[in-house]
């Protein structure tokens, strides 16, 4: 479970990126964070995996209190989360299997544990054939699937994704969404920031819309844009 | 820490040491010069400490007899010397005997001073009951008839120590300077390593590697740099000391003082230097980690 209470984030340069954010996400939910560029989506995501610390307010994730948390406890929090980005962040000198295994290696897992886990997760994202390929031998969609595999290989409770399809064409995007849906079906909470209208409309889930650092809409099974706005657009055409 | 983790850290640190090539070589050389100088300074300090302790414990007073003193007068002198408070024993060595010592030390060219040309004095060596008494005994002995000069153990040595002291101070000051250079060179290679691995570091942080897991390879790389830098200076110091010990040791032998033996000095010194070298490395790494490794 994930809980934010009156969270504010002000950057050192004075930009107030988030104001008074309060929200609760239950285990197993799929949540879209939508909003224009600069609205504060990435800032919120970074607060969740504690890349940033809130200026004010309370954040709780997987029973970790992020406000009370000491710096040396952060790794424990991150082991219960998976994070995926628009730019994949794969290590170019490692193969697909090594990139995924690395996530387990650096938290002290044994080689046999790693081998089994990597094999299984590659199967899940449909890349078993590409295990020994290097990232630059893969398409963008395949690279993002490697990144997703790396994020879920330690079986996190929550998968956080910041514009995971931002660099991908519509067809590839659909493949990624299918994988995310499957991960969600297995009980993993998914929080995904996006400004891809088509995704949100075709695969409806809870939508939280942020504008200018504030939550302006929180709707179960919502559309990318609010219905009223949709009507306006339709009538304008 | 698990064995597999240790193995991974060792491999990572050695790999990046190799990858840093010339940069690592410069740092290793910096450590080498530093350790050489620190080693020489330390060898000096150890020996000065030992010699001054020897001198402090020296109970001997040398009494030079005036030339042309008859053997009868010398007998009287001997018993007078025995009377001085605090004297335990008195022993005699003729000037011919003294010349023999000089020849054995400095070579046969001194042989020409044999016989009547011998410029040396006959010598009485007194032994005091305790080292503190030597100064008083020397003063009293100097006033007795037919005594040319009385010197207590180590007033020569003390002069020598003053020179050695300043040599040592310069050595220490220069070592500190080199230490800073070496640390800087190591910090620089570690900085390169950190920057070249920043993507890996980002991923490690993201997936929950502990701060120490991320730090270890850099600390180890620094320590290896130190260790590799110590090898050559250690060899030089160990062999160098052995020959210094032979050369200087023989000269000191007649005075009753001695340097630390090679086995007394070499092992403690080697261990100290290896430790210092590895600490320099780890410290250099720590400096770069503070600045460039935000974990
Ligand atoms: N590191 C930063 N320092 C200062 N301001 C920032 C920083 N990152 C983001 N911002 C500002 O915070 C606001 C929210 O940015 P962001 O969270 O990236 O929005 P989004 O992901 O929705 O596009 C923007 O006005 C942006 O300029
Ligand atoms: Mg963003």
Image (spheres, rainbow, N blue to C red):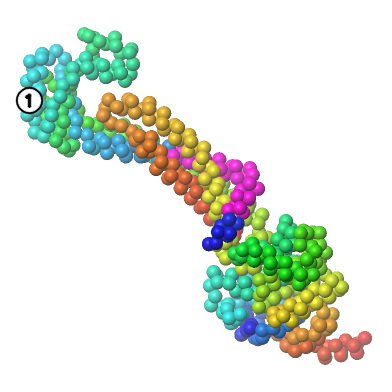
Q: Is residue B240 visible?
A: yes
Q: Is residue B24 magenta?
A: yes
Q: Residue at x 49, y 46 (%)?
A: B277
Residue A217 in view? no
How crowded is the residue under tag 1: few (<14 C-alpha within 10 Å), some, or many (20+)? few
x, y percentage for residue A34? 76, 80
Specify the segment rendered in magenta: B10-39
Residue B223 horizontal side relative to residue B168, left or right: right
- Position of B88 compared to B213: left or right? left
Q: Which of the 4 image quarters holds residue A204? A: bottom right
Secondary element at tag 1 = helix
Number of marks present in the image shown: 1
- Quick check: which quadrant has ligand 1? bottom right
Quarter where residue B238 is shown: top left
Q: Of residues A173 and A6, which is closer to you in this image? A: A173
State the residue position of label 1.
B80
**Is B201 in the magenta?**
no
Mark 1 residue CB less than 8 A from any atom of ligand 1: no
Q: Main secondary structure of the magenta part?
A: helix
* In the image, residue B92 above or below residue B136: above
The quadrant the N terminus of chain A occupies is bottom right
Q: Viewer-proximal residue, A133 or A62?
A: A133
Residue B218 vs residue B166, the one in the foreground: B218
Most foreground residue, B122 or A175: A175
Residue drawn 33% across and 18% down?
B106
Q: Position of residue A158 (x, y in %)?
A: 67, 78
Q: Position of residue B148 (x, y in %)?
A: 16, 21
The answer to whether residue A124 is above or below residue A186 is above
The image shows residue B227, relative to residue B150, as above or below, that is below
């Amino acid at each position: 479970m994930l809980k934010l209470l009156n969270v504010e984030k002000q950057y050192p340069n004075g930009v107030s990126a988030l104001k008074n954010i309060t929200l609760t996400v239950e285990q197993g939910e799929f949540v879209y964070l939508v909003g224009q560029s600069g609205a504060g989506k990435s800032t919120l995501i970074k607060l969740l995996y504690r890349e940033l610390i809130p200026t004010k307010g309370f954040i709780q994730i997987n029973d970790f209190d992020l406000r009370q948390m000491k710096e040396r406890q952060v790794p424990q929090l991150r082991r219960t989360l998976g994070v995926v980005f628009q730019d994949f962040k794969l290590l170019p000198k490692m193969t697909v299997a090594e990139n995924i295994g690395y996530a387990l290696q650096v938290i002290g897992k044994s080689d046999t544990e790693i081998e089994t886990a990597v094999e299984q997760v590659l199967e899940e994202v449909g890349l078993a054939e590409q295990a020994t390929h290097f990232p630059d031998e893969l398409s963008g969609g395949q690279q993002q699937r490697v990144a997703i595999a790396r994020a879920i290989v330690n079986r996190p409770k929550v998968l956080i994704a910041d514009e995971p399809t931002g660099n991908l064409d519509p067809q590839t995007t659909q493949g990624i969404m299918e994988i995310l849906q499957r991960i969600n079906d297995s009980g993993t909470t998914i929080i995904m920031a996006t400004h891809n209208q088509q995704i949100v409309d075709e695969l409806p889930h809870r939508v939280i819309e942020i504008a200018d650092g504030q939550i302006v809409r929180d709707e179960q099974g919502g559309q990318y844009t609010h219905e009223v706005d949709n009507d306006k657009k339709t009538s304008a055409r | 820490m698990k064995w597999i983790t240790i193995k991974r850290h060792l491999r990572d640190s050695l790999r990046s040491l190799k990858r840093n090539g010339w940069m690592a070589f410069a740092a290793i050389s910096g450590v080498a010069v530093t350790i050489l100088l620190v080693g020489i300074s330390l060898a000096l300090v150890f020996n000065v400490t030992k010699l001054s302790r020897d001198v402090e414990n020296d109970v001997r007073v040398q009494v030079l007899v005036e030339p042309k003193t008859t053997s009868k007068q010398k007998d009287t002198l001997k018993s007078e010397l025995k009377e001085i408070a605090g004297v335990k024993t008195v022993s005699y060595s003729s000037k011919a005997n003294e010349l023999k010592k000089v020849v054995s030390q400095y070579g046969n060219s001194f042989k020409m001073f044999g016989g009547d040309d011998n410029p040396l004095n006959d010598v009485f060596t007194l032994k005091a009951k305790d080292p503190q008494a030597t100064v008083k005994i020397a003063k009293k002995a100097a006033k007795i008839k037919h005594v040319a000069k009385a010197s207590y153990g180590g007033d020569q040595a003390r002069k020598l120590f003053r020179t050695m002291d300043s040599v040592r101070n310069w050595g220490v000051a220069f070592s500190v300077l080199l230490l800073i250079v070496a640390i800087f060179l190591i910090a620089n290679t570690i900085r390169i390593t950190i920057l070249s691995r920043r993507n890996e570091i980002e991923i490690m942080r993201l997936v929950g590697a502990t701060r120490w897991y991320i730090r270890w390879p850099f600390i180890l790389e620094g320590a290896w740099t130190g260790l590799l830098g110590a090898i050559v200076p250690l060899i030089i110091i160990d062999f160098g000391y052995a020959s210094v010990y032979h050369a200087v040791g023989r000269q000191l032998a007649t005075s009753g003082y001695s340097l630390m033996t090679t086995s007394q000095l070499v092992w403690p010194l080697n261990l100290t230097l290896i430790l210092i070298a590895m600490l320099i490395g780890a410290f250099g790494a720590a400096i770069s980690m503070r600045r460039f490794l935000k974990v």
